[in-house]
Amino acid sequence: MADVKFLLTGDTSLTVEFGNEISEAINTQIRAFNIALQESSIPGIVETVPTYRSLMIHYDPGVIQYKPLVKKLQALLGQLDKIVIPPSEVLEIPVLYGGETGPDLEFVAQHNGKTPEEVIKIHTSTEYLIYMLGFTPGFTYLGGMSDEIATPRLKTPRVKIPAGSVGIAGSQTGVYPIDSPGGWQLIGQTPVRMYDPDRETPILPQAGQYIKFYAIDKKEFDKIAAEEAAGTYVCKRHPREEAGK
Amino acid sequence: MSITVLNPGLLTTVQDLGRVGYQQFGVSVSGVMDPRAATLANILVGNPDGEAVLECTMMGPQLQFDQDNCIAITGGDLGPTLDGQPIATYRAIQVKAGQVLRFTAPKTGCRAFIAFAGGLDIPEVMGSRSTYMKAKIGGFQGRKLEKGDVIGFRAPQAELKNMPIRAMAPEFVPRPQYTIRVVLGPQDDYFTQEGIDTFLNEVYTVTPEFDRMGCRMEGPVIQHKDGGDIISDGIAFGAIQVPSAGKPIVMLCDRQTTGGYTKIANVISMDFRILAQLKAGDKVRFEKVSVQAAQDALLTQRQALSFLRSVMN
Protein backbone atom coordinates (compact mmCIF):
# COMPACT_ATOMS: atom_id res chain seq x y z
CA MET A 1 0.00 0.00 0.00
CA ALA A 2 3.05 2.24 -0.38
CA ASP A 3 1.57 4.06 -3.35
CA VAL A 4 -1.64 5.11 -1.62
CA LYS A 5 -2.12 8.88 -1.52
CA PHE A 6 -4.51 11.03 0.48
CA LEU A 7 -5.75 13.95 -1.61
CA LEU A 8 -7.50 17.00 -0.19
CA THR A 9 -10.84 17.72 -1.80
CA GLY A 10 -12.02 20.59 0.38
CA ASP A 11 -13.07 20.52 4.02
CA THR A 12 -15.79 17.83 4.01
CA SER A 13 -14.26 15.13 1.82
CA LEU A 14 -10.98 13.55 0.79
CA THR A 15 -9.87 11.14 -1.92
CA VAL A 16 -7.79 8.03 -1.30
CA GLU A 17 -5.90 7.30 -4.50
CA PHE A 18 -4.56 3.80 -5.13
CA GLY A 19 -2.61 4.35 -8.33
CA ASN A 20 -2.52 6.18 -11.63
CA GLU A 21 -3.86 3.64 -14.08
CA ILE A 22 -7.07 1.79 -14.87
CA SER A 23 -6.65 -1.82 -13.76
CA GLU A 24 -8.72 -4.56 -12.20
CA ALA A 25 -6.08 -4.98 -9.49
CA ILE A 26 -6.45 -1.36 -8.35
CA ASN A 27 -10.23 -1.62 -8.54
CA THR A 28 -10.14 -4.71 -6.31
CA GLN A 29 -8.16 -2.73 -3.70
CA ILE A 30 -10.70 0.08 -3.84
CA ARG A 31 -13.56 -2.37 -3.40
CA ALA A 32 -11.84 -4.05 -0.45
CA PHE A 33 -11.08 -0.69 1.18
CA ASN A 34 -14.67 0.50 0.68
CA ILE A 35 -16.04 -2.68 2.28
CA ALA A 36 -13.54 -2.44 5.14
CA LEU A 37 -14.53 1.20 5.69
CA GLN A 38 -18.26 0.36 5.82
CA GLU A 39 -17.54 -2.35 8.37
CA SER A 40 -15.15 -0.22 10.42
CA SER A 41 -16.16 1.84 13.41
CA ILE A 42 -14.73 5.07 11.97
CA PRO A 43 -17.28 7.73 12.86
CA GLY A 44 -18.53 10.60 10.70
CA ILE A 45 -18.41 8.93 7.27
CA VAL A 46 -21.27 10.37 5.20
CA GLU A 47 -20.86 8.58 1.86
CA THR A 48 -18.18 7.07 -0.36
CA VAL A 49 -17.72 7.29 -4.12
CA PRO A 50 -15.55 4.64 -5.80
CA THR A 51 -13.96 5.67 -9.11
CA TYR A 52 -11.40 4.08 -11.47
CA ARG A 53 -8.43 4.45 -9.17
CA SER A 54 -9.64 6.09 -6.01
CA LEU A 55 -12.25 6.21 -3.29
CA MET A 56 -13.74 9.59 -2.42
CA ILE A 57 -14.85 9.78 1.21
CA HIS A 58 -17.33 12.44 2.32
CA TYR A 59 -17.28 13.02 6.07
CA ASP A 60 -18.64 15.34 8.72
CA PRO A 61 -15.84 17.47 10.20
CA GLY A 62 -18.14 18.08 13.17
CA VAL A 63 -17.61 14.41 14.05
CA ILE A 64 -14.06 13.81 12.84
CA GLN A 65 -11.55 16.25 11.39
CA TYR A 66 -9.11 15.67 8.56
CA LYS A 67 -5.96 14.67 10.45
CA PRO A 68 -7.50 12.11 12.84
CA LEU A 69 -9.53 10.69 9.95
CA VAL A 70 -6.41 10.16 7.83
CA LYS A 71 -4.73 8.38 10.77
CA LYS A 72 -7.67 6.01 11.09
CA LEU A 73 -7.79 5.40 7.34
CA GLN A 74 -4.05 4.64 7.29
CA ALA A 75 -4.53 2.10 10.05
CA LEU A 76 -7.38 0.53 8.10
CA LEU A 77 -5.22 0.34 4.96
CA GLY A 78 -2.59 -1.51 6.98
CA GLN A 79 -5.10 -4.25 7.75
CA LEU A 80 -6.47 -4.49 4.24
CA ASP A 81 -4.72 -7.72 3.27
CA LYS A 82 -6.35 -9.43 6.27
CA ILE A 83 -9.83 -8.62 5.05
CA VAL A 84 -11.69 -11.34 3.22
CA ILE A 85 -13.91 -9.75 0.63
CA PRO A 86 -16.82 -11.66 -0.87
CA PRO A 87 -16.58 -12.52 -4.59
CA SER A 88 -17.97 -9.87 -6.93
CA GLU A 89 -21.49 -10.32 -8.23
CA VAL A 90 -22.24 -10.70 -11.91
CA LEU A 91 -25.44 -9.04 -13.12
CA GLU A 92 -27.00 -10.87 -16.08
CA ILE A 93 -28.42 -8.29 -18.45
CA PRO A 94 -30.68 -9.51 -21.30
CA VAL A 95 -30.31 -7.64 -24.60
CA LEU A 96 -32.40 -7.62 -27.77
CA TYR A 97 -29.65 -7.14 -30.37
CA GLY A 98 -30.03 -5.50 -33.79
CA GLY A 99 -33.18 -4.38 -35.56
CA GLU A 100 -34.89 -1.19 -34.43
CA THR A 101 -33.39 -1.44 -30.95
CA GLY A 102 -29.84 -1.83 -32.28
CA PRO A 103 -29.67 0.25 -35.47
CA ASP A 104 -25.85 0.32 -35.57
CA LEU A 105 -25.23 -3.43 -35.18
CA GLU A 106 -24.69 -3.85 -38.94
CA PHE A 107 -22.24 -0.94 -39.01
CA VAL A 108 -20.26 -2.28 -36.02
CA ALA A 109 -20.08 -5.66 -37.81
CA GLN A 110 -18.97 -4.13 -41.14
CA HIS A 111 -16.43 -1.86 -39.43
CA ASN A 112 -14.77 -4.90 -37.85
CA GLY A 113 -15.17 -7.28 -40.80
CA LYS A 114 -17.54 -9.52 -38.89
CA THR A 115 -21.12 -10.71 -39.15
CA PRO A 116 -23.72 -9.28 -36.72
CA GLU A 117 -23.93 -12.73 -35.13
CA GLU A 118 -20.18 -12.67 -34.45
CA VAL A 119 -20.47 -9.21 -32.87
CA ILE A 120 -23.23 -10.49 -30.57
CA LYS A 121 -21.17 -13.57 -29.70
CA ILE A 122 -18.15 -11.46 -28.76
CA HIS A 123 -20.23 -8.88 -26.88
CA THR A 124 -21.94 -11.57 -24.78
CA SER A 125 -18.77 -13.57 -24.06
CA THR A 126 -17.19 -11.21 -21.53
CA GLU A 127 -17.91 -10.28 -17.93
CA TYR A 128 -17.41 -6.52 -17.89
CA LEU A 129 -16.11 -4.93 -14.66
CA ILE A 130 -18.12 -1.92 -13.48
CA TYR A 131 -15.25 0.42 -12.59
CA MET A 132 -17.56 3.22 -11.52
CA LEU A 133 -20.86 4.98 -12.09
CA GLY A 134 -21.13 8.58 -13.18
CA PHE A 135 -22.25 11.02 -15.89
CA THR A 136 -25.96 10.31 -15.24
CA PRO A 137 -27.75 8.21 -12.61
CA GLY A 138 -26.91 4.56 -13.22
CA PHE A 139 -24.41 5.06 -16.06
CA THR A 140 -21.69 2.40 -15.77
CA TYR A 141 -18.10 2.78 -16.89
CA LEU A 142 -17.29 -0.79 -17.97
CA GLY A 143 -13.92 -2.33 -18.66
CA GLY A 144 -12.88 -5.35 -20.65
CA MET A 145 -14.55 -5.11 -24.06
CA SER A 146 -12.76 -6.94 -26.87
CA ASP A 147 -10.96 -4.72 -29.40
CA GLU A 148 -12.44 -7.01 -32.08
CA ILE A 149 -15.71 -5.06 -31.89
CA ALA A 150 -14.33 -1.59 -31.04
CA THR A 151 -15.99 1.10 -33.18
CA PRO A 152 -15.68 4.89 -33.18
CA ARG A 153 -18.56 7.04 -31.98
CA LEU A 154 -21.12 8.41 -34.43
CA LYS A 155 -19.91 11.53 -36.24
CA THR A 156 -23.22 13.22 -35.38
CA PRO A 157 -24.69 12.26 -32.01
CA ARG A 158 -28.35 11.28 -31.81
CA VAL A 159 -30.66 13.76 -30.10
CA LYS A 160 -32.53 11.15 -28.11
CA ILE A 161 -31.52 7.64 -27.26
CA PRO A 162 -34.07 5.54 -25.34
CA ALA A 163 -33.24 4.27 -21.86
CA GLY A 164 -31.83 0.74 -21.94
CA SER A 165 -29.94 1.19 -25.21
CA VAL A 166 -26.70 -0.78 -25.32
CA GLY A 167 -23.88 0.89 -27.19
CA ILE A 168 -20.23 0.84 -28.17
CA ALA A 169 -17.93 3.88 -28.21
CA GLY A 170 -14.33 3.18 -29.13
CA SER A 171 -13.32 0.25 -26.93
CA GLN A 172 -16.01 0.99 -24.33
CA THR A 173 -19.44 -0.54 -24.01
CA GLY A 174 -22.33 0.46 -21.81
CA VAL A 175 -26.04 0.97 -21.25
CA TYR A 176 -27.88 4.30 -21.36
CA PRO A 177 -29.84 4.35 -18.06
CA ILE A 178 -32.09 7.29 -19.01
CA ASP A 179 -33.32 8.81 -22.27
CA SER A 180 -30.47 11.08 -23.33
CA PRO A 181 -28.61 12.45 -26.33
CA GLY A 182 -25.50 10.49 -27.28
CA GLY A 183 -23.02 9.37 -29.89
CA TRP A 184 -22.54 5.70 -29.09
CA GLN A 185 -23.07 3.02 -31.74
CA LEU A 186 -26.30 1.31 -30.65
CA ILE A 187 -26.22 -2.48 -30.98
CA GLY A 188 -29.24 -3.42 -28.86
CA GLN A 189 -31.51 -2.61 -25.98
CA THR A 190 -32.20 -4.15 -22.59
CA PRO A 191 -35.69 -4.15 -21.09
CA VAL A 192 -34.06 -4.11 -17.62
CA ARG A 193 -34.30 -0.78 -15.84
CA MET A 194 -30.80 0.16 -14.74
CA TYR A 195 -32.37 3.18 -13.04
CA ASP A 196 -35.83 3.81 -11.63
CA PRO A 197 -36.08 6.70 -9.13
CA ASP A 198 -39.29 5.32 -7.61
CA ARG A 199 -37.86 1.87 -6.86
CA GLU A 200 -36.62 0.95 -3.37
CA THR A 201 -33.17 0.43 -4.86
CA PRO A 202 -33.22 3.14 -7.52
CA ILE A 203 -30.02 2.09 -9.27
CA LEU A 204 -29.38 -1.54 -10.18
CA PRO A 205 -25.63 -1.72 -10.88
CA GLN A 206 -22.88 -1.01 -8.34
CA ALA A 207 -19.20 -0.27 -8.80
CA GLY A 208 -17.18 -3.46 -8.35
CA GLN A 209 -19.86 -5.74 -9.79
CA TYR A 210 -19.62 -7.23 -13.28
CA ILE A 211 -22.14 -7.16 -16.11
CA LYS A 212 -22.67 -10.09 -18.47
CA PHE A 213 -24.97 -9.51 -21.42
CA TYR A 214 -27.03 -12.30 -22.99
CA ALA A 215 -29.13 -12.24 -26.14
CA ILE A 216 -32.92 -12.48 -26.01
CA ASP A 217 -35.68 -12.34 -28.63
CA LYS A 218 -38.55 -9.85 -28.96
CA LYS A 219 -40.96 -12.08 -27.07
CA GLU A 220 -38.64 -12.34 -24.07
CA PHE A 221 -37.94 -8.60 -24.29
CA ASP A 222 -41.66 -7.79 -24.07
CA LYS A 223 -42.14 -10.23 -21.19
CA ILE A 224 -39.32 -8.68 -19.12
CA ALA A 225 -40.46 -5.15 -20.02
CA ALA A 226 -43.93 -5.99 -18.72
CA GLU A 227 -42.46 -7.42 -15.51
CA GLU A 228 -40.35 -4.27 -15.06
CA ALA A 229 -43.47 -2.13 -15.53
CA ALA A 230 -45.27 -4.20 -12.90
CA GLY A 231 -42.30 -3.99 -10.54
CA THR A 232 -41.93 -7.77 -10.34
CA TYR A 233 -38.75 -8.30 -12.38
CA VAL A 234 -35.73 -9.54 -10.45
CA CYS A 235 -32.42 -9.20 -12.29
CA LYS A 236 -30.52 -12.48 -12.41
CA ARG A 237 -27.17 -12.40 -10.64
CA HIS A 238 -24.51 -14.87 -9.50
CA PRO A 239 -21.20 -14.75 -7.63
CA ARG A 240 -18.26 -14.41 -9.99
CA GLU A 241 -15.81 -17.26 -10.23
CA GLU A 242 -12.45 -15.65 -9.59
CA ALA A 243 -9.82 -16.12 -12.30
CA GLY A 244 -7.59 -19.13 -11.71
CA LYS A 245 -10.10 -21.04 -9.64
CA MET B 1 -53.33 24.98 1.97
CA SER B 2 -50.84 26.26 -0.55
CA ILE B 3 -49.12 28.82 -2.73
CA THR B 4 -49.92 29.41 -6.39
CA VAL B 5 -47.16 30.46 -8.75
CA LEU B 6 -48.37 33.58 -10.63
CA ASN B 7 -44.96 34.05 -12.24
CA PRO B 8 -42.05 31.63 -11.78
CA GLY B 9 -39.25 34.19 -12.18
CA LEU B 10 -36.06 33.26 -13.96
CA LEU B 11 -35.21 29.99 -12.23
CA THR B 12 -37.03 28.98 -9.07
CA THR B 13 -36.56 25.45 -7.76
CA VAL B 14 -37.33 23.46 -4.62
CA GLN B 15 -34.05 22.57 -2.85
CA ASP B 16 -32.97 21.17 0.50
CA LEU B 17 -29.44 20.34 1.64
CA GLY B 18 -29.05 17.79 -1.15
CA ARG B 19 -29.38 14.12 -2.00
CA VAL B 20 -26.85 12.31 0.17
CA GLY B 21 -25.66 8.75 -0.42
CA TYR B 22 -26.25 8.34 -4.16
CA GLN B 23 -23.11 9.88 -5.69
CA GLN B 24 -21.67 6.36 -5.98
CA PHE B 25 -24.54 5.66 -8.42
CA GLY B 26 -23.91 8.76 -10.53
CA VAL B 27 -26.69 10.83 -8.94
CA SER B 28 -25.76 14.50 -8.48
CA VAL B 29 -26.18 15.91 -4.98
CA SER B 30 -28.17 19.02 -6.02
CA GLY B 31 -29.44 21.07 -3.06
CA VAL B 32 -29.23 24.78 -2.29
CA MET B 33 -26.32 26.80 -3.63
CA ASP B 34 -25.94 28.55 -0.26
CA PRO B 35 -26.52 26.06 2.58
CA ARG B 36 -25.89 28.69 5.28
CA ALA B 37 -28.53 31.09 3.95
CA ALA B 38 -31.10 28.31 3.49
CA THR B 39 -30.42 27.00 7.00
CA LEU B 40 -30.83 30.51 8.43
CA ALA B 41 -34.16 30.94 6.64
CA ASN B 42 -35.32 27.64 8.14
CA ILE B 43 -34.14 28.60 11.63
CA LEU B 44 -36.00 31.94 11.38
CA VAL B 45 -39.32 30.13 10.78
CA GLY B 46 -38.63 27.29 13.23
CA ASN B 47 -37.98 24.54 10.67
CA PRO B 48 -35.32 21.84 10.89
CA ASP B 49 -32.10 22.72 9.02
CA GLY B 50 -32.74 20.36 6.14
CA GLU B 51 -36.26 21.54 5.27
CA ALA B 52 -36.79 22.32 1.58
CA VAL B 53 -36.88 25.98 0.53
CA LEU B 54 -37.42 27.78 -2.76
CA GLU B 55 -34.18 28.88 -4.38
CA CYS B 56 -34.78 31.95 -6.57
CA THR B 57 -32.29 33.19 -9.14
CA MET B 58 -31.91 36.88 -10.13
CA MET B 59 -35.56 37.54 -10.96
CA GLY B 60 -37.64 36.08 -8.14
CA PRO B 61 -41.13 34.60 -8.48
CA GLN B 62 -44.62 35.97 -7.76
CA LEU B 63 -46.41 33.72 -5.30
CA GLN B 64 -49.99 34.02 -4.11
CA PHE B 65 -50.71 32.64 -0.66
CA ASP B 66 -53.93 30.69 -0.35
CA GLN B 67 -53.43 30.25 3.40
CA ASP B 68 -51.74 32.10 6.28
CA ASN B 69 -48.14 31.10 6.91
CA CYS B 70 -44.84 32.49 8.13
CA ILE B 71 -41.87 32.82 5.80
CA ALA B 72 -38.29 34.05 5.87
CA ILE B 73 -36.18 35.20 2.93
CA THR B 74 -32.37 35.04 3.06
CA GLY B 75 -29.43 35.09 0.66
CA GLY B 76 -29.24 37.87 -1.93
CA ASP B 77 -31.65 40.81 -1.71
CA LEU B 78 -33.83 40.40 -4.81
CA GLY B 79 -36.24 43.14 -3.67
CA PRO B 80 -39.07 41.20 -1.99
CA THR B 81 -42.47 42.90 -1.52
CA LEU B 82 -45.73 41.74 0.02
CA ASP B 83 -48.80 43.26 -1.68
CA GLY B 84 -46.43 45.90 -3.02
CA GLN B 85 -44.84 46.83 0.32
CA PRO B 86 -41.12 46.12 0.66
CA ILE B 87 -40.36 43.48 3.29
CA ALA B 88 -37.16 42.71 5.17
CA THR B 89 -34.86 39.83 4.39
CA TYR B 90 -33.35 37.76 7.24
CA ARG B 91 -36.54 38.17 9.29
CA ALA B 92 -39.61 35.97 9.86
CA ILE B 93 -42.65 37.53 8.13
CA GLN B 94 -46.33 36.69 8.66
CA VAL B 95 -48.23 36.30 5.40
CA LYS B 96 -52.04 36.28 5.17
CA ALA B 97 -54.13 34.24 2.78
CA GLY B 98 -54.65 36.23 -0.42
CA GLN B 99 -51.41 38.19 -0.17
CA VAL B 100 -48.91 38.14 -3.03
CA LEU B 101 -45.14 37.90 -2.58
CA ARG B 102 -43.21 39.56 -5.42
CA PHE B 103 -39.60 40.33 -6.15
CA THR B 104 -38.94 43.65 -7.87
CA ALA B 105 -35.29 43.55 -8.91
CA PRO B 106 -31.98 42.26 -7.54
CA LYS B 107 -30.31 44.79 -5.22
CA THR B 108 -27.44 42.68 -3.93
CA GLY B 109 -26.42 39.17 -4.89
CA CYS B 110 -28.03 36.69 -7.20
CA ARG B 111 -29.89 34.00 -5.24
CA ALA B 112 -32.55 34.24 -2.54
CA PHE B 113 -34.02 31.44 -0.41
CA ILE B 114 -37.60 31.39 0.84
CA ALA B 115 -38.41 29.13 3.80
CA PHE B 116 -42.02 28.33 4.70
CA ALA B 117 -42.89 27.43 8.28
CA GLY B 118 -43.82 23.76 8.47
CA GLY B 119 -42.29 23.02 5.07
CA LEU B 120 -43.59 22.42 1.55
CA ASP B 121 -45.64 19.40 0.54
CA ILE B 122 -43.07 17.93 -1.81
CA PRO B 123 -42.39 14.17 -1.94
CA GLU B 124 -38.90 12.94 -1.18
CA VAL B 125 -37.03 11.13 -3.94
CA MET B 126 -34.02 9.14 -2.73
CA GLY B 127 -34.27 10.83 0.64
CA SER B 128 -34.35 14.42 -0.61
CA ARG B 129 -36.76 17.07 -1.89
CA SER B 130 -34.07 18.73 -4.02
CA THR B 131 -34.79 19.30 -7.70
CA TYR B 132 -32.27 17.55 -9.96
CA MET B 133 -33.22 19.04 -13.29
CA LYS B 134 -30.93 16.98 -15.53
CA ALA B 135 -32.45 13.70 -14.32
CA LYS B 136 -35.92 15.28 -13.94
CA ILE B 137 -36.37 14.06 -10.37
CA GLY B 138 -37.15 15.62 -7.00
CA GLY B 139 -38.60 19.02 -6.19
CA PHE B 140 -41.78 19.98 -8.01
CA GLN B 141 -42.18 17.32 -10.73
CA GLY B 142 -38.42 17.30 -11.30
CA ARG B 143 -38.35 20.75 -12.85
CA LYS B 144 -38.18 24.48 -12.19
CA LEU B 145 -41.45 26.16 -11.20
CA GLU B 146 -43.83 27.32 -13.90
CA LYS B 147 -46.84 29.61 -13.99
CA GLY B 148 -49.91 27.99 -12.42
CA ASP B 149 -48.03 25.47 -10.27
CA VAL B 150 -49.66 24.94 -6.89
CA ILE B 151 -47.48 23.80 -3.98
CA GLY B 152 -49.05 22.68 -0.72
CA PHE B 153 -47.86 23.49 2.79
CA ARG B 154 -47.28 20.56 5.14
CA ALA B 155 -47.85 22.23 8.53
CA PRO B 156 -48.33 26.00 8.03
CA GLN B 157 -48.05 28.32 11.05
CA ALA B 158 -50.16 31.48 10.97
CA GLU B 159 -47.91 32.79 13.72
CA LEU B 160 -44.73 31.79 15.51
CA LYS B 161 -43.67 32.47 19.07
CA ASN B 162 -40.92 35.01 19.71
CA MET B 163 -41.68 36.87 16.44
CA PRO B 164 -39.81 40.05 17.48
CA ILE B 165 -36.51 38.21 17.83
CA ARG B 166 -36.89 36.06 14.68
CA ALA B 167 -34.50 38.27 12.77
CA MET B 168 -30.80 38.60 12.11
CA ALA B 169 -29.09 41.74 13.36
CA PRO B 170 -27.92 43.73 10.31
CA GLU B 171 -24.25 43.20 11.16
CA PHE B 172 -24.74 39.44 10.76
CA VAL B 173 -26.32 39.73 7.33
CA PRO B 174 -23.56 38.83 4.88
CA ARG B 175 -22.36 41.52 2.48
CA PRO B 176 -21.08 40.81 -1.02
CA GLN B 177 -17.53 39.47 -0.90
CA TYR B 178 -15.07 38.69 -3.64
CA THR B 179 -12.23 36.87 -1.92
CA ILE B 180 -12.89 33.15 -2.01
CA ARG B 181 -10.94 30.90 0.34
CA VAL B 182 -9.73 27.56 -1.01
CA VAL B 183 -7.92 24.42 0.12
CA LEU B 184 -5.39 23.33 -2.52
CA GLY B 185 -5.87 19.85 -4.01
CA PRO B 186 -6.65 17.20 -5.11
CA GLN B 187 -4.50 17.74 -8.22
CA ASP B 188 -2.47 20.85 -7.32
CA ASP B 189 0.66 18.78 -8.10
CA TYR B 190 -0.40 18.72 -11.79
CA PHE B 191 0.36 22.46 -12.00
CA THR B 192 3.67 24.34 -12.19
CA GLN B 193 4.58 26.63 -9.29
CA GLU B 194 3.94 29.49 -11.71
CA GLY B 195 0.46 28.07 -12.36
CA ILE B 196 -0.34 27.91 -8.64
CA ASP B 197 0.98 31.47 -8.18
CA THR B 198 -1.17 32.71 -11.06
CA PHE B 199 -4.25 31.07 -9.58
CA LEU B 200 -3.66 32.56 -6.11
CA ASN B 201 -2.55 36.05 -7.17
CA GLU B 202 -4.54 37.01 -10.26
CA VAL B 203 -8.11 38.27 -10.60
CA TYR B 204 -10.73 36.02 -12.26
CA THR B 205 -13.97 37.27 -13.79
CA VAL B 206 -17.27 35.39 -13.62
CA THR B 207 -18.59 34.69 -17.14
CA PRO B 208 -22.27 34.33 -18.13
CA GLU B 209 -21.65 30.55 -18.30
CA PHE B 210 -22.78 30.20 -14.73
CA ASP B 211 -25.57 27.85 -13.66
CA ARG B 212 -26.24 25.37 -10.88
CA MET B 213 -23.76 22.92 -12.42
CA GLY B 214 -20.78 25.21 -12.57
CA CYS B 215 -19.30 28.66 -12.97
CA ARG B 216 -16.78 29.35 -15.71
CA MET B 217 -14.26 32.09 -15.00
CA GLU B 218 -12.07 34.12 -17.33
CA GLY B 219 -8.57 35.28 -16.48
CA PRO B 220 -4.86 34.51 -16.84
CA VAL B 221 -4.06 30.96 -17.94
CA ILE B 222 -3.18 28.61 -15.07
CA GLN B 223 -0.21 26.60 -16.27
CA HIS B 224 -0.22 22.80 -16.05
CA LYS B 225 2.92 20.67 -15.98
CA ASP B 226 1.51 18.27 -18.56
CA GLY B 227 -2.08 19.04 -19.55
CA GLY B 228 -5.34 19.07 -17.67
CA ASP B 229 -6.61 15.51 -18.18
CA ILE B 230 -6.72 12.87 -15.47
CA ILE B 231 -8.34 9.47 -15.03
CA SER B 232 -11.80 10.48 -13.81
CA ASP B 233 -12.32 10.79 -10.08
CA GLY B 234 -14.91 12.23 -7.69
CA ILE B 235 -15.85 15.92 -7.63
CA ALA B 236 -16.79 17.82 -4.45
CA PHE B 237 -19.00 20.93 -4.18
CA GLY B 238 -16.72 23.89 -4.86
CA ALA B 239 -14.04 21.92 -6.74
CA ILE B 240 -12.14 24.20 -9.12
CA GLN B 241 -11.56 22.30 -12.35
CA VAL B 242 -8.89 23.56 -14.68
CA PRO B 243 -9.01 21.86 -18.10
CA SER B 244 -6.01 22.10 -20.44
CA ALA B 245 -7.08 25.57 -21.64
CA GLY B 246 -6.10 26.79 -18.17
CA LYS B 247 -9.33 28.63 -17.22
CA PRO B 248 -11.06 27.71 -13.94
CA ILE B 249 -14.54 26.21 -13.66
CA VAL B 250 -16.02 26.08 -10.14
CA MET B 251 -18.19 22.99 -9.77
CA LEU B 252 -21.51 23.59 -7.98
CA CYS B 253 -24.59 21.71 -6.67
CA ASP B 254 -25.76 20.05 -9.88
CA ARG B 255 -22.20 19.04 -10.88
CA GLN B 256 -21.54 15.61 -12.30
CA THR B 257 -20.35 13.19 -9.64
CA THR B 258 -17.11 12.37 -11.46
CA GLY B 259 -14.91 14.09 -14.01
CA GLY B 260 -11.65 13.86 -15.90
CA TYR B 261 -10.14 17.33 -15.50
CA THR B 262 -7.50 18.42 -13.01
CA LYS B 263 -8.86 20.16 -9.93
CA ILE B 264 -6.42 22.71 -8.55
CA ALA B 265 -8.31 23.52 -5.34
CA ASN B 266 -11.64 23.37 -3.54
CA VAL B 267 -13.64 26.33 -2.22
CA ILE B 268 -14.14 25.99 1.55
CA SER B 269 -17.68 25.31 2.81
CA MET B 270 -17.85 28.68 4.60
CA ASP B 271 -17.44 30.49 1.27
CA PHE B 272 -20.13 28.66 -0.77
CA ARG B 273 -22.28 31.66 0.14
CA ILE B 274 -19.92 33.90 -1.82
CA LEU B 275 -20.14 31.62 -4.87
CA ALA B 276 -23.95 31.54 -4.65
CA GLN B 277 -24.22 35.31 -4.90
CA LEU B 278 -21.76 35.94 -7.76
CA LYS B 279 -22.97 37.46 -11.02
CA ALA B 280 -21.48 37.58 -14.50
CA GLY B 281 -18.81 40.28 -14.55
CA ASP B 282 -17.91 40.00 -10.84
CA LYS B 283 -14.17 39.80 -10.18
CA VAL B 284 -12.83 37.40 -7.56
CA ARG B 285 -9.55 36.35 -6.00
CA PHE B 286 -8.69 32.99 -4.48
CA GLU B 287 -6.95 32.78 -1.11
CA LYS B 288 -5.26 29.63 0.17
CA VAL B 289 -6.10 28.37 3.67
CA SER B 290 -5.35 25.10 5.48
CA VAL B 291 -7.94 22.37 5.78
CA GLN B 292 -7.72 22.79 9.56
CA ALA B 293 -8.61 26.50 9.30
CA ALA B 294 -11.48 25.69 6.92
CA GLN B 295 -12.91 23.06 9.27
CA ASP B 296 -12.52 25.27 12.35
CA ALA B 297 -14.39 28.07 10.55
CA LEU B 298 -17.19 25.70 9.53
CA LEU B 299 -17.60 24.36 13.07
CA THR B 300 -17.63 27.87 14.54
CA GLN B 301 -20.41 28.77 12.12
CA ARG B 302 -22.39 25.65 13.03
CA GLN B 303 -22.16 26.58 16.72
CA ALA B 304 -23.42 30.09 15.95
CA LEU B 305 -26.38 28.67 14.01
CA SER B 306 -27.29 26.23 16.74
CA PHE B 307 -27.09 29.06 19.33
CA LEU B 308 -29.43 31.14 17.17
CA ARG B 309 -31.86 28.25 16.95
CA SER B 310 -31.88 27.75 20.72
CA VAL B 311 -32.56 31.46 21.29
CA MET B 312 -35.48 31.63 18.85
CA ASN B 313 -37.33 28.50 19.88
Image: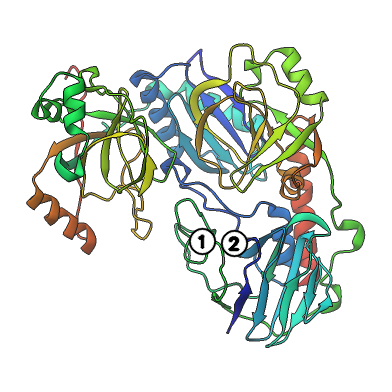
Residue B179 against residue B27 in the figure, above or below: above
Question: Tag count in the figure?
Answer: 2
Q: Which mark is residue B294?
A: none
Q: Is residue B177 above or below residue B260?
A: below
Q: Which residue is drawn at 35% across and 49% down?
A: A179
Indicate the chain on which mark 1 is placed.
Answer: B
The quadrant in which residue A231 appears is bottom left
Tell me whether the residue at label 2 lies in contact with that at label 1, contact meaning CB atoms closer than 8 angstroms. yes
| Percent x, y of residue B165 | 85, 73
As drawn, B254 above or below B51:
above
Identified at 70% across, 52% down, the residue is B34
Q: Where is residue A133 shown, x and y percent of the image?
A: 40, 37
Amino acid type, residue under disc 1 in the picture: Arg
**Residue B277 at x, y percent in the picture:** 75, 50
Q: In which quarter of the image is residue B203?
A: top right
Q: State how far apart marks 2 and 1 are (Cα).
A: 7 Å
Q: How crowded is mark 2: few (under 14 residues within 10 Å), some or many (20 or more)?
A: many
Q: Position of residue B130 (x, y in %)?
A: 54, 58
The numbered mark, 2 or 1, whose residue comes first in the sequence reads 2
Would you name the residue on which mark 1 appears? B143
Among the 4 quarters of the image, the one containing residue A185: top left
- Numbered disc 1: secondary structure: loop
User: In terms of depth relative to the viewer, which is nearer, B152 or A234?
Assistant: B152
**Which one is in front, B208 or B262?**
B208
**Neighbour tally class for label 1: few under 14, some 14-19, many 20 plus, Cα within 10 Å:** some
Residue A106 left/right relative to B41? left
Q: Nearer the viewer, residue A180 or B158?
A: A180
On the rendered structure, is A182 left or right of A230? Answer: right
Residue annotated with mark 2: B13
**Observer able to see residue A40:** no
Q: Does residue B15 show up?
A: yes
